[in-house]
Structures are given as structure tokens and as C-alpha cells.
Amino acid sequence: MGPRIVSNPSPHDPSIEDISKFQILTLFLSLARAGKVKAATPKVDKQEKPKTPKGRARKRIVYTRRFVNVTMTGGKRKMNANPSS
């Protein structure tokens, strides 16, 4: 059953107050449940990883990964090529 629609509501109409109280209550209850998954998840420390190369060294690794290690049909090297086709 939805809220009552009044064509000319007065500020002293109790149905208008009930609607706003209901909306405030539902907002408060939804905020009370916020963050429950993150709070229940156990904290895991970050692992130490080797430094990732930047700049020219990264471009070199990407090139070898895409073109040198992958045998493509037709022998053509193309950027954004799909290696499976």
C-alpha cells in the first residue's frame, strides 16, 4: 500500500510527516548495514613483490611477450593482435 497522494497537502497533515519519517528511517537502516562485508573480511598483509620495470624496460618486456614469444600465423606483427586467431 503506497503513500496517500494529496493534491493540496497542508504542512500540518500527519500523513506527510509519516512519509518523511518512514523515508528517514529506511535511509538510517540502510546506512546501518553499510560496510558489513568489508568488516567481516579478514585482513591480509600485502606481500613483497619485485619492482616492476618502468618506461623503456617495460616496453621491452611487453614487446617480447606479444611478438617474440608468440608464433602468429602469416608472420605479420600487428599491434592489438589476438594471439589465438
Image (cartoon, rainbow, N blue to C red):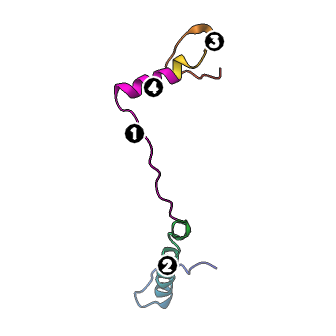
The kind of residue tagged 4 is Ile
Mark 2 lies on residue: 23
Part of the protein shown in magenta: 43-65
Percent across and percent down for residue 60 are: 42, 22
Instruction: Give the foreground label among 1 and 4.
Output: 1
What is the C-alpha distance between the residues marked 2 and 3? 62 Å
What is the C-alpha distance between the residues marked 4 and 3? 22 Å
Q: Can you see residue 82?
A: yes
Instruction: Give the foreground label among 2 and 1.
Output: 1
Q: Earlier in the sequence, mark 1 or mark 4?
A: 1
Q: Earlier in the sequence, mark 4 or mark 2?
A: 2
The kind of residue tagged 2 is Gln
- Label 2 CA crowd tier, 10 Å (few <14, some 14–19, many 20+): few
- C-beta proximity under 8 Å, tags 2 and 1: no
Mark 3 lies on residue: 73
Instruction: Give the foreground label among 1 and 3.
Output: 1
* Residue at 46% in and 87% down: 17
What is the C-alpha distance between the residues marked 2 and 1? 51 Å
Instruction: Give the foreground label among 4 and 2.
Output: 4
* Residue at 50% in and 71% down: 34
Q: Earlier in the sequence, mark 2 or mark 3?
A: 2
Instruction: Give the foreground label among 2 and 3.
Output: 3
Q: Is residue 61 magenta?
A: yes
Mark 4 lies on residue: 61
The kind of residue tagged 3 is Thr
Percent across and percent down for residue 57 are: 38, 26
Label 4 SS: helix
The kind of residue tagged 1 is Lys
* Whether residue 38 is situated above or below residue 68 in the rendered picture: below
Percent across and percent down for residue 50 are: 43, 40
Mark 1 lies on residue: 51
